[in-house]
Amino acid sequence: MTDASAAPPTTEPVIRPRRSLRRAAAPLLLAALLSGAGGIGVAGPAPATAASGPSGVTAIARRQYSLEIHGGAAFAALHRVGRDATLLRLVRSGDATATRAYVAREFAAVWYHLHVSRVRVLQGARTVADAGVPFTVAPVQMALHGAGGRVAGTLQVAIQDEIGFVRFMHRNYGVDVVVRGRVPGHVRTSLPAAASVSLPAAGSVRIAGQRYRVSSFHDHAWNGEPVTVSILQRG
């Protein structure tokens, strides 16, 4: 678990474990999650037992992953950042240097502690500012409007990194998880011995002398990167 009081990355992004339950530290985001504003709401982990097998837990994992991208907490965080008056003023001004400095400073000082894992500001296809953890779930986005309603930029926000999702599932459901992307080094797992093992989409595999039943699903990470999420259960 990442201590919310710990200093977030200030220069190069640092991979830190994140917990979905840290929403409790941000009442606005928690309220949005419970009410389902902008997406599916969930009050806590759904019941799951060892007898349900990896496919049953995989269905829960798929829903949780979707919530991290499309749920109310994601949209609450997006609109909270998007309503930042200073950010809007800087984006409208076209001052890329000042915008970049402000995003880096606010991410470290404020947004990171409100369960924001990554923030990016675009103007057209050009990235103006990008701060946060490198391997996150896919972001939600909104237009930032300038004078006369014209679009001054696009804001993208992700509220969960992949290792946080892995640890959430491992902690709450007792399964091991491997998230594997396409970018070199984009592998996060609760079972280090599984990081370099070729896993079946479904079936069984032996890792470090232990047999695991495997079930999996596909989704996307930051930049639309395809990811495969594998659920491993002993037996």
Image: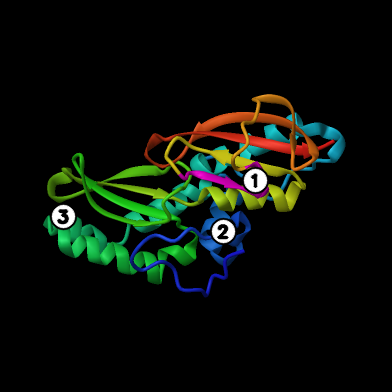
What residue did someone put label 1 on?
Answer: 42
Name the quadrant containing residue 97. bottom left
What residue did someone put label 3 on?
Answer: 92
- The numbered mark, 1 or 3, whose residue comes first in the sequence reads 1
- Real-space CA distance between mark 3 and mark 2, rounded to the nearest whole angstrom: 34 Å
The residue positioned farthest toward the right in the image shown: 51
Q: Where is residue 182 in the image (x, y as percent from the top left)?
A: 45, 35
Residue name at image x 42 percent, y 43 percent = 139
Residue name at image x 40 percent, y 35 percent = 224
Q: What residue type is labelled 2?
A: Pro
- The numbered mark, 3 or 2, whose residue comes first in the sequence reads 2
Residue name at image x 48 percent, y 44 percent = 186
Residue span colored magenta: 185-194
Determine if residue 40 is in view: no
Callout 1 touching callout 3 (CB < 8 Å) = no
Q: In which quarter of the image is the N terminus?
A: bottom right
Front-lying residue, 135 or 41: 135
Crowding near the residue tagged with mark 3, few <14, some 14–19, many ≥20 C-alpha atoms within 10 Å: some
Crowding near the residue tagged with mark 1, few <14, some 14–19, many ≥20 C-alpha atoms within 10 Å: some
Crowding near the residue tagged with mark 2, few <14, some 14–19, many ≥20 C-alpha atoms within 10 Å: some
What residue did someone put label 2 on?
Answer: 17
Q: Does the magenta stretch include residue 88?
A: no
Q: Is residue 191 magenta?
A: yes
Q: Which amino acid does label 1 sit on?
A: Val
Q: Position of residue 175 (x, y in %)?
A: 74, 44
- Real-space CA distance between mark 1 and mark 3, rounded to the nearest whole angstrom: 36 Å
